[in-house]
Amino acid sequence: MGRRIAQASAQAPLMLSPASHPFLFDTSAESWLTRSHDPAVRGWFREYLSLYPVHISALTVVERIRGYALLWRRAQEKRRDDIETARLAYLHALGQVWPLDAAVGVVAGEIMALLPHPPPRRAECISSRNRGRSAWFAGASTA
């Protein structure tokens, strides 16, 4: 019986009820949830927002602002105003931002280890268009 449950959970993603409790979203989750076109994801997030505000850590703010800054620096002059407008809109719409210290990091690590399928360290794929190959690198994991 246990083996069948493990196989089933390996095949289908685990979706916690939005009503279960508030979540602390990392940068990739925050971005993915707001950009997803999947009706199930959009419905989940809409239900979550009807119950709780979005909670993020200070590290998420650092990562997002870094992203805006890098994008702004690489952008053509005519796009920079739009990028700055998006950055200011992000800052204006921030919900609860939680500090991230060593104690929070320790607790988050322990909780992550209890998950049935602990998330792997974040790995991102960079595609090399001209060679058709992929290079992998490990990014910094976030709480």
Image (cartoon, rainbow, N blue to C red):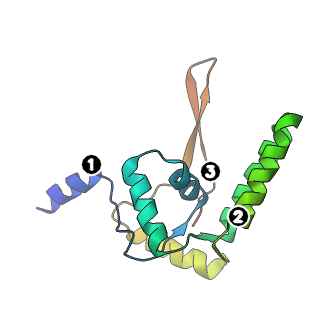
Mark on residue 139?
Answer: 3
Q: How many marks?
A: 3
Q: Residue at x 45, y 62 (%)?
A: 46
Q: Which of marks 3 and 1 precedes in the sequence?
A: 1
Q: CA distance from mark 1 to mark 2?
A: 33 Å
Mark toward the viewer: 1 or 2:
2
Q: Position of residue 140 (x, y in %)?
A: 63, 56
Mark toward the viewer: 2 or 3:
2
Height in image: 90 above or below 21? above
Q: Which residue is mark 1?
A: 11
Q: Which of marks 3 and 2 precedes in the sequence?
A: 2
Q: Residue at x 57, y 58 (%)?
A: 30
Q: Position of residue 8 (x, y in %)?
A: 21, 53
Q: Position of residue 42 (x, y in %)?
A: 44, 54
Q: Residue at x 78, y 46 (%)?
A: 83
Q: CA distance from mark 1 to mark 3?
A: 26 Å
Q: Tell whether label 2 touches label 1 (CB within 8 Å).
A: no
Height in image: 59 above or below 76? below
Q: Tell whether label 3 touches label 2 (CB within 8 Å).
A: no
Looking at the picture, which amino acid does disc 1 mark?
Gln
Q: What crowding class fits label 2: few (fewer than 14 Cα within 10 Å), some (14-19), or many (20 or more)?
A: some
Residue at the extreme top of the image, as rendered: 130
Q: CA distance from mark 2 to mark 3?
A: 17 Å
Quarter occupied by the C terminus: bottom right
Q: Which of marks 2 and 1 precedes in the sequence?
A: 1
Mark on residue 61?
Answer: 2
Looking at the picture, which amino acid does disc 2 mark?
Val
Q: Element under label 3? A: loop
Q: What crowding class fits label 3: few (fewer than 14 Cα within 10 Å), some (14-19), or many (20 or more)?
A: few
Mark on residue 74?
Answer: none
